[in-house]
Amino acid sequence: MHIDLSGRAALVTGASRGIGRAIALALGASGAAVAVNYRGSEAAANEVVAQITQAGGKAIAIQGDVSAAATHEALIKATTAAFGRLDILINNAGITRDNLLLRMKADEIDDVLNTNLRGVMLLTKAALRPMMKNKWGRIVSMSSIIGLTGNAGQANYAATKAGLLGFTKSVALEMASRNITANAICPGFIETDMTAAALTADLRAKALERVPLGRLGTPEDIANAVVFLASDAAAYITGQTLAVDGGWTMY
Amino acid sequence: MDFSDQVTIVTGGTGSLGREIVTGLIERGSRVLFCYRQRDETAQELVDLLGNDDRLVAVKADVRDQEAMNAMVEEALRRWERLDTLITAHSTVSNAPIVDMTLEQWNEVLDVMLRGVTRVCRAALRPMQKARYGRIVNVVGYQPLAGALMQANYAAALGGVIGFSKALAREVAAWGITINCVAPGLISRPQMASFDPSYIPWATNIVPLKRLGTPAEVVPAVLMLAERESGYMTGQTITVDGGWRMV
């Protein structure tokens, strides 16, 4: 999708790998300056930055764990310090701690909630002021089809991903008069490190049976939708959920 | 969004949204055949405005006529030997409270809005299946998602289109064909000039973004779903409504 985001600055959480990496690269290719947030994979984040800058774009890597208490303002400040502004926030960082609810430990619930939901809320909150200053803002949060369908063994993860949808709609309502939109994307099964580790050949075949398009998605499939929602082209779209899932759910 | 080399059919090309869709496609390099039912002059104006190099053709054809839809697809294939994308943007309304709605009103709206979509999809699918590629985008409305006074026929027909699109998405996924819908919310249209003067202030106020949408703002969502790169979305409906309903 040839969308022009030049002059815009974006922060992408969890951008060193997988879907976040593809989003950062796509935003960079569209002309946005990109803050590539990572938690542990510094080398991978630097590689994403290098790819963007070598293509003539602007990018920096910023370390920060979105589940940590003091990270949120710092991430936003690092972005605005580097680029002078913040227009686009992509809440992409997410974790899983799968277990059946019967056996799920409180820690497994807290970890997932802290990163996937509380982290998104606090980071979004911190991003609002610079966006209000611009009178323009785009917030795109990565939910999941698991937030729509549920999944055995992922009660904690499903709750956060469904919670994000309600959060997104509320932010959309609160910020509409400021020309800030908030939308969510529900990826289906996407080829990433996370799914490669979780999917045995057997599970993979079973998953594919449920995907009408007959293939796993690519991170680029998701990045394409993100760039669209982050652009002027989506100015009248807010509070929405887009499933990019090869026809899995069709909700 | 690059549509050069591609061929697109648009129904309802003379409507306020259809015109913008046709314009957007031509600007991005597509060859476009659009059909219209009544407005010869508007169709000619659009062709004169945009079509300077044989990339734009208007066909007078009624979506209520399967033969006409088949012939329209044949015409696109005869000219350009391919069909990549179908966008249905035709529209007709016939409003009344349900208890007063005549059978003719029901039938007309269902025939145009629901059966019309199924006819043109049937006609377009064969070449898409042969090419093992296709994009279909059906413009629906907020009515089937949110309900609308005096528009039970319209809401039912477009709800039918959404269900049809999902079923078809499953049927033809194996051929690399995707089908999605775009549901515009309250969009400013020329007809609104004749509405009660309280309508626009009311509508502006109930939309969180505090304004009506424009037809041009609906087009990017349509084109996003129509482009080659969006190959992993199918059976979906994108709502473009300024946050009005969030459904």
Image (cartoon, coloured by chain):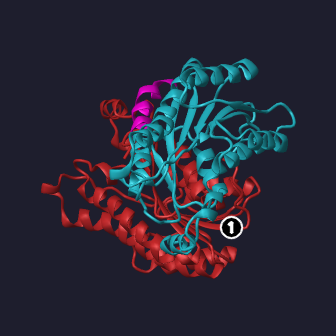
Give the answer, above or below, for where B1 lies relative to A122: above
In the image, residue B13 lies in the stretch drawn in magenta: no
In the image, residue B170 lies in the stretch drawn in magenta: yes
- Residue B141: x %, y % from top left: 49, 51
- Residue A83: x %, y % from top left: 68, 73
- Residue B57: x %, y % from top left: 76, 32
What residue is shown at x 75% (from left), y 44% (from top)? B42
Residue B228 figure quarter? top right
Colour displayed for chain A in the image of the structure: red
Furthest residue toward left: A102
Q: Amino acid at mark 1?
A: Arg
Give the answer, above or below, for where B95 lies relative to B179: below
Q: Considering the image in quadrants, where does the N terminus of chain B appear? A: top right
Residue B10 figure quarter? top right
Residue B60: tell me if it is visible: yes
Q: Which residues are magenta?
A: B163-175
The residue wearing badge 1 is: A8
Q: Considering the image in quadrants, where does the C terminus of chain B appear? A: bottom left
Q: Which chain is cyan?
A: B
